[in-house]
Image (tube, grey):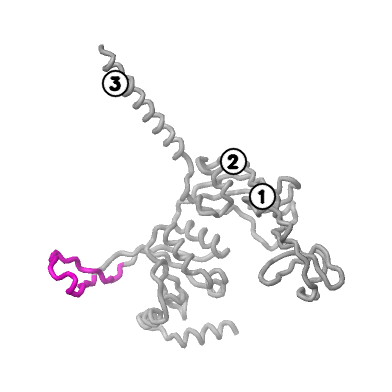
């Protein structure tokens, strides 16, 4: 065998070995839980230095610490890669399996930030409500939240750092299950976004939609008017039952479009319809033509939707105002 042939075989063997190693590395990287997976997570977080409780999903831990008497403690459903927990915790979970446990330390800079001496400022005590003029009181000044360190005469020393600024945080976590049920996923996301337990369900609706007619004639394309046809298409729809609590929820009122977009992306659906029960029937509501998820909406669309459902908007307002009274 010539030296040239031996060199070619050696190069081929090296290439095959490199390809096999790459495939092996890729397989190892993609094994286990990955970004985009919905998981039920149990965790407890404490400061590294003092062991103070930061957060927990364990009711026994909460009871031992004497915190959150009016709060429900239970495992959380999160989506890996969506920032529902600190990045360091997510990355520690990625690649694990259901039933796995772990401990990871989140540095202060990635948790609640480093302590900034410049955020401890002296202000006039007159800017603080009289009932809050004492050391340790939490106050809001010009949209900033802080706590009072000292107050002497007419001056107050207020710390506007996060109470846990400068603290490294240690997370003990356990993956309890992978959530595959679509309604559980939708409910969990709404709980993450709004801290509310809402009734949801999925339906595949057949709706009429205007679609552009493609023409094979390239002549006079710039001068001709586009043609549309009405076709029936299937829309995968998430229905959310509206409640007075949802209507008044601040996150919902301020960010429903963003929430809807995240829901449609993460749940792989076409649209969202918010429904409210009115006199035994279900009407489409939500202030957005009843439909959300990248479809926009405005007053005219809402009026058309109400007319299609044979609903009198003024009667709805009167009924809601009566219920509030």
Point out the residue furthest to the right here: 153
Q: Is residue 241 above or below residue 66?
A: below
**Separation of residues labelled 2 and 3 (CA atoms):** 49 Å
Q: Against 123, is 80 above or below?
A: above
Residue 226 colored in magenta in the image: yes
Q: Residues within 10 Å of mark 1 (few under 14, many from 20)?
A: some
The residue that disc 2 covers is 101
**For discs 1 and 2, the disc positioned in front in the rendered view:** 1
In front: 134, or 103?
A: 134
* Residue drawn where x is 55% and y is 55% of the image: 84
Q: Nearer the viewer, residue 177 or 45?
A: 45
Dividing the picture into quadrants, the one containing residue 224 is bottom left
Residue bearing the label numbered 1:
108
In the orientation shown, which residue stands out farthest toward the top?
1
Image-quadrant location for residue 8: top left
Q: Which of the marked residues, 3 or 1, is nearer the chain's N terminus? A: 3
Does the magenta run of residues contain 208?
Answer: yes
x and y percentages locating residue 102 in the rendered image: 60, 41
Residue at 22% across, 72% down: 228
Instruction: State which region is magenta.
Output: 206-230
Q: Which residue is mark 3?
A: 8
């Amino acid at each position: 065998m010539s030296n040239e042939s031996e060199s070619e075989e050696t190069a081929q063997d090296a290439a095959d070995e490199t390809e096999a190693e790459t495939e092996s590395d890729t397989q190892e990287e993609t094994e286990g839980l990955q970004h985009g997976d919905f998981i039920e997570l149990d965790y407890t977080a404490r400061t590294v230095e003092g062991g103070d409780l930061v957060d927990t999903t364990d009711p026994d831990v909460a009871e031992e610490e004497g915190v959150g008497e009016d709060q429900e403690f239970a495992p959380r459903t999160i989506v890996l890669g969506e920032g529902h927990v600190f990045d360091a915790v997510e990355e520690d979970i990625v690649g694990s399996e259901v039933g796995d446990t772990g401990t990871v330390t989140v540095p202060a800079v990635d948790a609640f930030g480093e302590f900034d001496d410049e955020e401890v400022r002296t202000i006039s005590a007159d800017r603080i409500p009289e009932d809050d003029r004492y050391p340790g009181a939490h106050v809001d000044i010009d949209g900033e939240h802080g706590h009072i360190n000292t107050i002497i005469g007419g001056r107050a020393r207020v710390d506007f750092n996060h109470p846990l600024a400068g603290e490294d945080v240690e997370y003990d976590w356990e993956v309890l299950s992978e959530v595959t049920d679509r309604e559980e996923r939708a409910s969990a996301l709404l709980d993450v976004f709004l801290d509310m337990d809402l009734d949801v369900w999925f339906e595949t609706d057949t709706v009429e939609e205007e679609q552009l007619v493609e023409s094979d004639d390239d002549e006079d394309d710039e001068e001709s008017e586009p043609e549309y046809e009405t076709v029936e298409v299937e829309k995968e729809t998430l229905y959310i039952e509206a409640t007075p609590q949802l209507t008044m929820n601040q996150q919902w009122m301020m960010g429903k479009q963003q929430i809807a977009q995240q829901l449609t992306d993460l749940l792989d659906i076409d649209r969202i319809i918010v429904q409210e029960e009115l006199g035994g029937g279900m009407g489409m509501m939500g202030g957005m033509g009843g439909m959300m998820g990248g479809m926009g909406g405005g007053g005219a669309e809402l009026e058309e939707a109400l007319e299609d459902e044979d609903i009198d908007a003024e009667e709805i307002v009167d009924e809601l105002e009566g219920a509030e009274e």
